[in-house]
Amino acid sequence: MNTNPHVEDFIAHPNLHFGHPIDVLNEPTLSTDDKRRILESWKLDAQRLAESTAENMSGGEETDLRDVSKVLVQLNEMDKAPVAKQHDPKLPTNTKGVGAGMGLGAVVGAGAGLLISAVTVPSLAVIAQATLVGIIIGGVSAAVRNAVRS
C-alpha cells in the first residue's frame, strides 16, 4: 500500500506534478518503487510524443525523453550502490588483535633495527626507530584485519 495517496495521480500525469524528472528523484516522500513507476510513465509519455513528432502529428512540443532516461539511469545506479555496513554500538569492538599486532610489530621492528645496526654503524636510535615503525605497522595491519573480518 502506498504511503502517498497521490502516487497514482503522479504516475498518470507526472509532468503536471513535477517540473523536471530530477524532481521525482529528489522527492523524499516517495519510495524507490514509486519513483521508478512515475519515471517509467513519464518516459512512456515522452516516447509517444517523440513518435508523434516524428510522424508530424504533434504541435511541436519538446519531449522529455532524454532527461527522463538519464534520471532513470541515476535511480537504477542508486539501487545498485552498496550500502555501508554500520557498526552496532551494542556489539563489542574487537581490539584484542590490535595489541597483539603492535607487540609482534615491535619485536619484528626491534629485530630489524638490530640487524641494521649490526650491518652498519651500531646505533640505539636505529633500533628505537625500527621498533616504533614495527609497532605502528603491526597495529595498523591488525586493525585493518579486524575491520575486514567484522
Image (cartoon, rainbow, N blue to C red):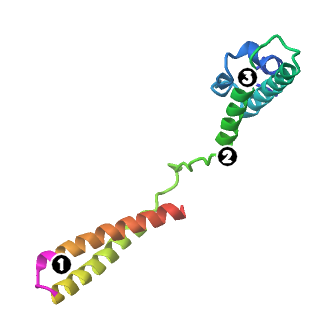
Outermost bottom residue: 118
Query: Helix, strand or loop at disc 2?
Result: helix
| Location of residue 97 in the rendering, given as x and y in whole percent from the top left corner | 42, 69
Residue 67 in magenta stretch: no
Which is more foreground, mark 2 or mark 1?
A: 2
| Location of residue 38 in the rendering, given as x and y in whole percent from the top left corner | 77, 26
Q: Which residue is mark 1?
A: 127
CA gap between label 2 and label 1 equals 50 Å
Quadrant including the C terminus:
bottom right
**Magenta span:** 120-127
Quadrant including the N terminus:
top right
Q: Is residue 126 above or below residue 60?
A: below
Outermost top residue: 59
Q: Is residue 87 above or below residue 94?
A: above
In the image, taking residue 142 as reference, residue 65 lies left or right, namely right
Choose top left, top right, bottom left or bottom right for residue 55: top right
Q: Amino acid at mark 1?
A: Ile
Query: Helix, strand or loop at disc 3?
Result: loop
| Residue at screen point 40% across, 68% down | 141
| Residue at screen point 67% across, 46% down | 80
Which is more foreground, mark 2 or mark 3?
A: 3
Q: Mark 3 or mark 1, which is nearer the start of the sequence?
A: 3
Q: Which residue is mark 2?
A: 80
Query: Helix, strand or loop at disc 1?
Result: helix
| Mark count | 3
Which is more foreground, mark 1 or mark 3?
A: 3
Count residues near mark 2 (Cα–Cα under 10 Å), then give few for <14, some for 14-19, many for 20+: few
Q: Which residue is mark 3?
A: 64
| Residue at screen point 79% across, 27% down | 43
